[in-house]
Image (cartoon, helix red, strand yellow):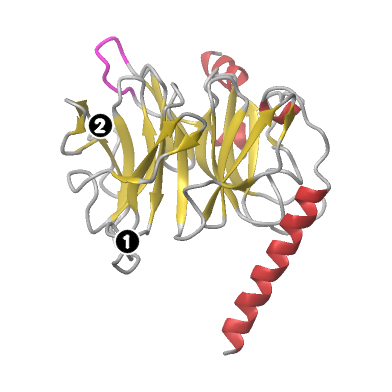
Amino acid sequence: MKKLSSIIGILLVTLICIHAQNKKLPKLTGPYLGQKPPGIAPEIFAPGIISSEGVELCISFSADGRECYFQRGRKILVTQERNGSWTPPEVASFSGIYPDGDPFLTIDGKKLFFTSERPIQKEDDPKKDTDIWYVKREGQEWSEPVYLGNKVNTTNNERTPTIALDGTLYFHVFDGKNPCDLFYSNFENEKYSSPKPVIVLNTASGSEADAYISSQKEFILFLQDGISISFADENGDWKIPIRLKDIIGSQYENTWPRVSPDEKYLFFSSFRPDPDHPNTRPPSIYWLSFEAILTEINQ
């Protein structure tokens, strides 16, 4: 009973904070919520707007940089630039009932993939594992969520879907016991094929997770001893991963890497302190120049 009261109290505080935050939202204009572009040093993204006192993860932008989806807690939120200014973040139309997360907006903006514990049939109980779902753009609205199917989804946890321009799906699987591994599935005849492991990147003893695939499959970012990047060779095979922790910050836990559609910025979630939280804080979203990272790698 005491635990339930504590949970209710936390939820009430969170709702009050979000309400106050939305009420005080300043007028923001321009791509990426009008934030000043970062350099090579990671900076918290849109403090008090996107990055709040809650848990923020896994951000995804539209190709024009004027539509943004991200995970806060176990809900997917959206903010858009309308009539010259950004709207306060609000729960997306397809989220808010079941535990949802890992939003990924395709480069053409026509589909948004995410993970959820929602039941496959509405009359069933919520699932105990996460599956991959998507919604389709219907005018200015999103469709009802569509289950990706049993070829991709299993009784394990499928997480962090990311889609290349040709429809290839990358994601990771966690069975609750063993380390995570990366998988991919080809989009053929309007359906996804049976997933295959990314053998060249998966390790026997380590964990590989939270992939981001570039639109042309030129590079892939994922977790492997921190955030790492692998580039494709002329045959499309993945090269030896390069670890980015010395650039991003090796003393912090950094997760959920995502590159903006224009490939100018790297976004990620990080459990790092700030002046208001000198010891630790819930994960917030940070960003830095991806172009500067590539320059650093080339040097």
Q: Please indicate, yes or no, whether residue 299 appears anywhere in the rendered image.
A: yes
Residue numbers of the magenta segment: 233-239
| Position of residue 294 in the picture relative to residue 219 (left or right) | right
236 in magenta: yes
**Extreme-bottom residue of the structure:** 1
In this view, the residue in front, 128 or 205, is: 128
The relative height of residue 226 versus residue 53 in the rendered view (above or below) is above
> Residue 122 shows which numbered tag?
1
**Extreme-top residue of the structure:** 234
In this view, the residue in front, 278 or 49, is: 49
17 in magenta: no
**Can you tell which quarter of the image residue 116 is in?**
bottom left
Residue type at the position of mark 2: Val
* Residue that numbered label 2 is attached to: 200
Residue in view at x 29 percent, y 27 percent = 168
Residue in view at x 49 percent, y 52 percent = 95
